[in-house]
Amino acid sequence: MAFFNHLARRSFAQSAAMANAIKNVTVIGSGLMGSGIAQVAAQTGHNVTMVDIDPVAVEKAQKRIGASIARVAKKKFGEGDDAAKFMNESMSHLKTSTDAVASVESADLVVEAIVENLKVKKELFSKLDGAAPAHTIFASNTSSIPIAKIAEATSRLDRFGGLHFFNPVPVMKLLEVVRIPETSDGTYEAMKGWGKAMGKVTVECKDTPGFIVNRLLVPYMFEAVRLVERGEASPRDVDTAMKLGAGHPMGPFELMDYVGLDTGKFIIDGWHADYPDEEIFKPSPMLEKLVADGKLGVKSGEGFYSYKK
Ligand SMILES: CCCCCCC[C@H](O)CC(=O)SCCNC(=O)CCNC(=O)[C@H](O)C(C)(C)COP(=O)([O-])OP(=O)([O-])OC[C@H]1O[C@@H](n2cnc3c(N)ncnc32)[C@H](O)[C@@H]1OP(=O)([O-])[O-]
Ligand SMILES: NC(=O)c1ccc[n+]([C@@H]2O[C@H](COP(=O)([O-])OP(=O)(O)OC[C@H]3O[C@@H](n4cnc5c(N)ncnc54)[C@H](O)[C@@H]3O)[C@@H](O)[C@H]2O)c1
């Protein structure tokens, strides 16, 4: 018994040490998710570099983060000195860059949150693999792509996993921590420990399509799309029904607009390619048209609904 207690203490100490070892975090992608992850990492005292290929995206992300940190500060401290101190300290932990390769040179953890496209994610990780130190853990925030397929681009499968956050990151408490068969126990413990240091509740999941939440959420959203396409109800009434009848904070159309319809299309196209016989994953004419018209949801000012002021 004493021996097992000793082992348990040692593995706890090891995982705590690895989680504590994550100080320098590089977040690649400064869109909806990357900016949220970078913000929470900075708020929780990590040294963060947030990277995007698009300098305009970085600039917008900084503004979004400033506004969001102000909301968090107000909620935590009200008005006054403590709120200002929290905001200043958080912002002082955040750097930005447009050079992904240079930004990983001293990273303990890289969290990728770029476009939901396997080829683009692999190209990125393959470049980073040669530039990051040997100890650096790589993680993807993908919604739907198998982690193993992304990890193939690197030679560090034991230091690779999934860290799936939820939108809006500063508010949503959940973090799905995903391992592939090669992920080492040390890496997995470090990812979970970091999630806790970020203030999230972590759940563990294997590298299964959609992990836990999206395995249930995506078919639900697409049932809603089919229902509207069949002319059985309007998006507004479906949303009202799910909010007032099922207690959801947003209806499925509001939520799709919030997530981004381009991301929704990437997810469904990927799953349709992988599971061509599944009716629910077949392309939706309604979604195809909105994306083709540049109506990507809240982020572009219009999707199923208009957000233009
Ligand atoms: C097509 C297929 C698509 C597949 C999708 C897969 C996507 C993905 O992989 C998984 C997901 O993320 S799935 C998506 C998972 N996500 C969901 O399911 C989300 C469902 N929606 C919700 O939970 C709620 O509607 C919200 C929390 C978004 C807003 O809450 P509300 O009550 O309706 O409105 P409120 O009054 O404005 O906000 C209330 C308070 O929240 C705080 N706050 C809010 N935003 C903030 C920010 N950016 N920063 C900081 N703080 C922020 C703030 O404290 C505010 O209080 P304040 O006094 O005003 O400062
Ligand atoms: N939107 C959501 O609700 C949500 C939730 C959980 C997970 N995700 C996943 O997170 C990832 C990002 O989603 P998002 O909603 O933040 O997308 P987004 O469109 O808001 O942002 C993506 C950003 O990545 C940048 N980018 C693209 N290619 C890049 C590259 N090679 N190097 C650096 N930057 C690059 C783009 O310029 C853009 O700013 C996707 O994998 C998505 O599936 C999204």
Image (cartoon, helix red, strand yellow):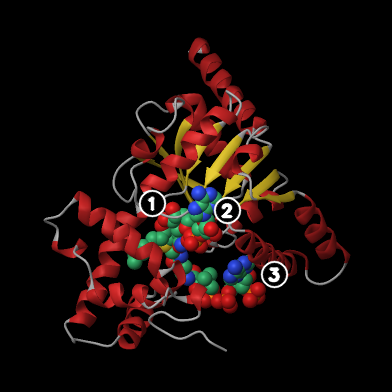
Real-space CA distance between mark 1 and mark 2, rounded to the nearest whole angstrom: 15 Å
* Residue 173 visible here: no
* Residue 207 visible here: yes
Please name the amino acid that badge 3 sits on. Answer: Ala
Residue for badge 3: 67
Q: Earlier in the sequence, mark 3 or mark 2?
A: 2
Real-space CA distance between mark 3 and mark 1, rounded to the nearest whole angstrom: 29 Å
Left of 78 or right of it: where is 201?
Answer: left
Seen from this angle, which residue lies furthest right? Answer: 81
Q: 10 Å neighbourhood of mark 2: few (<14), some, or many (≥20)?
A: some
Q: Secondary structure at mark 2?
A: loop
| Residue under the image location 65 percent in, 40 percent down | 103
Please name the amino acid that badge 2 sits on. Answer: Ile
Instruction: Specify whether tag 2 is near ligand 2 (CB below 8 Å).
Output: yes
Instruction: Specify whether tag 3 is near ligand 1 (CB below 8 Å).
Output: yes
Mark 1 or 2: in front is 2
Instruction: Specify whether tag 1 is near ligand 2 (CB below 8 Å).
Output: yes
Please determine whether, in this image, residue 276 is positioned above or below residue 107: below
Q: Secondary structure at mark 3?
A: helix
Residue for badge 1: 117
Please name the amino acid that badge 1 sits on. Answer: Asn
